[in-house]
Image (tube, rainbow, N blue to C red):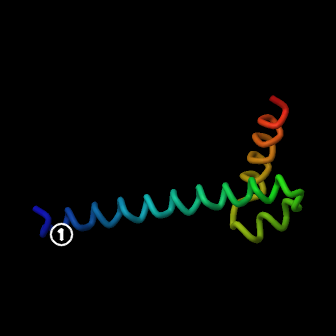
Amino acid sequence: MRESVIYQDILQEGLEQGLEQGLEQKAQEIATNMLNEGVAIALIVRVTGLTVGQVQQLEAQTNHNQAE
């Protein structure tokens, strides 16, 4: 079964998805740290590759967590 082309395609796709999720999670972690240091959203977007909306959402979450 492991030699199957279909199996290999599914395995490769799963690995790629996992890698993408890991990279996005790391970018969000970096963005959160940058927000905590007062870095401008525009710079965070350029550095991390996240969208403005994603960074603004992280900012809102960060502000909410700090208020608690």
Residue 44, x across and y down, in percent: 79, 64
Note whether 59 is above or below 22 in the view shown: above
Residue 64, x across and y down, in percent: 80, 35
Q: Quadrant of the C terminus?
A: top right
Q: Quadrant of the N terminus?
A: bottom left
Q: Which residue is mark 1?
A: 5
The answer to which of 32 and 12 lies nearer the viewer is 32
* Circle 1 residues within 10 Å: few <14, some 14–19, many ≥20: few
Left or right of 48 in this view: 2: left
Residue 50, by quadrant, is: bottom right
Left or right of 50 in this view: 2: left
Q: Which residue is pictured at 23% across the width and 67% down the height?
A: 8
In this view, the residue farthest toward the left is 1
Q: Check disc 1 and give the amino acid type.
A: Val
Please tell me whether mark 1 sits on a helix, a strand or a loop. Answer: helix
Left or right of 42 in this view: 1: left
The answer to which of 16 and 37 lies nearer the viewer is 37
Residue 33, by quadrant, is: bottom right
Note whether 4 is above or below 54 in the view shown: below
Q: Which residue is pictured at 67% across the width and 55% down the height?
A: 29
